Amino acid sequence: MSRVLVIGCGGVASVAIHKICQVSDVFTDLCIASRTVSKCDVLAEELKGNTKTNITTAKVDADNTDEVIALINKFKPDVVLNVALPYQDLTIMDACLACKVPYVDTANYECEDTDNPEWRKVYEERCKRLGFTAYFDYSWQWAYREKYKEAGITGLLGTGFDPGVTSVFTAYAQKHYFDEIHTIDILDCNGGDHGYPFATNFNPEINLREVSAPGSYWEDGHWVEIPPMSIKREYDFEGVGMKDMYLLHHEEIEALAANIPHVKRIRFFMTFGQSYLTHMKCLENVGMLRTDSVEFNGQQIVPIQFLKALLPDPASLGPRTVGKTNIGCIFTGIKDGKERKIYIYNVCDHQECYREVGSQAISYTTGVPAMIGTMLVAKGIWNKPGVFTTDEFDPDPYMDALNKYGLPWKVDENPVLVD
Ligand code: NDP
C-alpha cells in the first residue's frame, strides 16, 4: 500500500513505470512527473486499464527544489524515484529531505554545467585528492548522509544495473561465496544491434560524457587513471559470443572500494564495436562532445546537447534492437582457506524486453532494478536512515526480486578470468 512519485519519463522511467504497474499490491498509487508532461500523459493512457495502480501525472521542473517540494506536498508519496537525469539528483534529494520522504535514484550526481566555477573548484580539488577526473562522483550525495539520518529517511543511490545490480551481486558474493573478495571485474556486454550507424542506448549526453572520459580502476588502495579506451580485452560472453571490451571509469567502483573489505582491485569493462568507437572519436575530434557553451549565430549552444537533438531517441530503439546483453561480475578471492572464482550475471534479450514493456534491454536492465530498489524501500525491507548504495543492504531479497521480475541471474563457478 504505497504511493510512489516517479520523476522523469524517458527510456529508463518508462520501464520502471511499467514494472511498478505490474506490482499494484505494493504500488497502489503512482504519479508520473516530468518536464514534458505530455510524455507522462501518453504513458499513463497506455497503462490505464492494464493495471490496478491509480495513475496521475504532473509537470515538474526538477532543477527547481521548490517545485519538487510542492509536488511532494500535493501527492504525498511514500517514496520518490528519480529517473530524470543525474543533474537533478541534488535538487530532488533536497526536496525529499525537506519533506522527509525516502529518495531513490539510478545514477550519481553530475553537474550539467562543467564551467560552473563553484562546482569546478570542488571538482578540481577532488581530482587531485582521489586521482580520477570523471565529472561524477559520490561525494556530493554522500554529503547528505548525516542529514538523511537525522531526518530518519533512507536515500538509496544507484539502483540500476550498473551501478545497482552489480553492487548487489557483490554483496551476495560476499555473503554466500567468499570470506574475502580480492578482485572484482564488472563486465557490461551489449550484443544488441539497432541497425543505425550510431546511436546510444541511454541518454546520449550522459552516455557520451561517460564513455569519452579517461578510464580508471582501483588497485591496492588507490585509483589508476588511463587514457580513454586504452585498455582493451576480448571476452566470450554466454548468449552473445566474443566481444571487444574496454576499461572505463564507473561509479560503483568508488562505493565498492569503500565498502568491500580486503578488495585489492576493481575494474569495469564495457563492450563497444569498432564503428561506435570510430564515430565517437570523430565527434570528439570535431568538438561535438564538448560540454561547455559556444556561440553560434548569436546564440549560446552546448555541442553535446545539440548532438543529442540529432541522435535517435534511445526510447525509440526498442522495436529495432535484436540480440542480447550479458552483464555481471567476476569475483576472485578466498573461501575456507581455498581460492575461489565465480561469475554472477544476467543475460537479457532485447526483443523479449520489447515484447513485455516496449523497450530495449538497456532501459529494461536499468528500469527493473529501479523498481525493485523502490519496492524494497517502500516495503520497509531496505530501510536504514542515511544515504546508501545497494551493496550496503541485505542482497537476498533483491536477488529474489531479480528472478521474479524479469532479470534472472546465474552463477558460473568456473569462469574464464580477464587478464
Ligand atoms: P532520458 O533522456 O531518456 O530521460 C530523462 C527524462 O528526464 C526525460 O523524461 C526528461 O524530460 C526528464 N528530465 C530531464 N530534465 C528534467 C528536469 N529538469 N525536470 C524534470 N524532468 C526532467 O534518460 P534515460 O531514461 O536514458 O536515463 C535516465 C537515468 O537513468 C539517467 O540518470 C541515467 O544516467 C540513468 N541510467 C542508469 C543506468 C544504470 O545501470 N544505473 C543505465 C542507464 C541509465 P524531457 O522529456 O522533457 O526531456
Image (cartoon, rainbow, N blue to C red):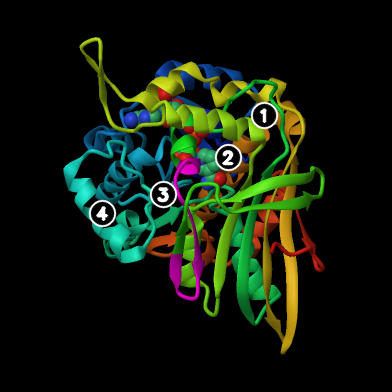
Tell me if label 1 and label 2 are in contact, CB under 8 Å: yes
The disc labelled 3 sits on which kind of residue? Asn
Callout 1: CB less than 8 Å from ligand 1: no
Callout 4: CB less than 8 Å from ligand 1: no
**Where residue 367 is drawn, which disc sits there?**
2
Image x and y of residue 6, in percent: 45, 36
The disc labelled 2 sits on which kind of residue? Gly
* Residue denoted by label 3: 108
* Residue denoted by label 4: 124
The disc labelled 1 sits on which kind of residue? Val
Label 1 Cα crowd, 10 Å radius (few <14 / some 14-19 / many 20+): some
- The secondary structure type at the circle numbered 3 is loop
- The secondary structure type at the circle numbered 2 is helix
Mark 1 to mark 2: distance in Å? Answer: 10 Å
Label 2 Cα crowd, 10 Å radius (few <14 / some 14-19 / many 20+): many
Mark 1 to mark 3: distance in Å? Answer: 26 Å
291 up-or-down from 176: above or below: above
Tell me if label 1 and label 3 are in contact, CB under 8 Å: no
Mark 2 to mark 3: distance in Å? Answer: 16 Å
- The secondary structure type at the circle numbered 4 is helix
Of 288 and 398, the residue lying toward us:
288
Residue 222 located left or right of residue 119: right
Tell me if label 2 and label 4 are in contact, CB under 8 Å: no
Image x and y of residue 372, in percent: 58, 49
Residue 137 among those drawn in magenta: no
